[in-house]
Amino acid sequence: MTERAEQRKDPVDAIIDQWAAVRPDLDTAAMEVFGRIYRLSRAMGDRMEKAYARLGISRGEFDVLATLRRSGEPYTLSPRQLSATLMLTTGGMTGRLDKLERAGLLRRSPDPHDRRGLQVTLTDEGLALVDEAVGAGLAVQTEALSAALDGEQAGQLAGLLRELLSATEQ
């Protein structure tokens, strides 16, 4: 019995088996890796969305708050910096900022160094919420990871994914 046959089957295995039946000439090794990465990303994205929804925010809104939080005190960036970091259009960013500002989680103010610019700053409420949200998100991720891998395996996987990501982003 092969190593793959000894492992528990997943939906990607079914896809690979179907391709093998109709196109045995294909090498589907890359599809096995990227298919699982894609499915894992979707599944974990859904779990993260639920964790943040309990706190009244979406994943996209969390991303804005978390980017401000990671910037360090005074938790202030320009809308342009936020857009570049999150790879969002200015229109997409404006919508998120409007909603988060109405919720009292951030505030926009004139940039004292640029009369035409704005600054976006976390409020105390936003800081408290993003700190709670990052903890909730990490708990979901840690639970999923520890259900399948031990610490050494998780470290190996992180290293392999870092190499793959680096190679694909070049």
Image (cartoon, rainbow, N blue to C red):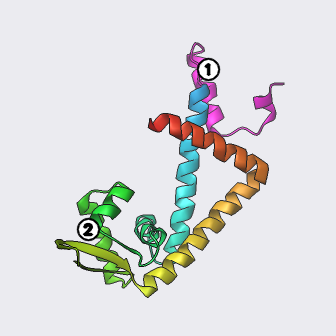
Question: Which one is nearer the viewer's eye here, 83 or 147?
Answer: 83
The residue at which mark 1 appears reads as 20
The mark total stands at: 2
- Residue 52 coordinates in the image, percent (x, y): 51, 71
- At 28% across and 74% down in the image, what residue appears? 119
Residue 15 lies in the magenta-colored region: yes
**Badge 2 amino acid:** Thr
The residue at which mark 2 appears reads as 94
Q: Which residues are magenta?
A: 1-28
Kind of element beneath mark 2: helix
Kind of element beneath mark 1: helix
- At 27% across and 56% down in the image, what residue appears? 89
Residue 81 against residue 40 in the figure, above or below: below
Question: Quick check: 123 left or right of 38?
Answer: left
Comparing labels 1 and 2, the label whose residue is closer to the camera: 2
Q: Mark 1 or mark 2: which comes first in sequence? A: 1
Badge 1: how crowded within 10 Å, few (<14), some, or many (20+)?
some
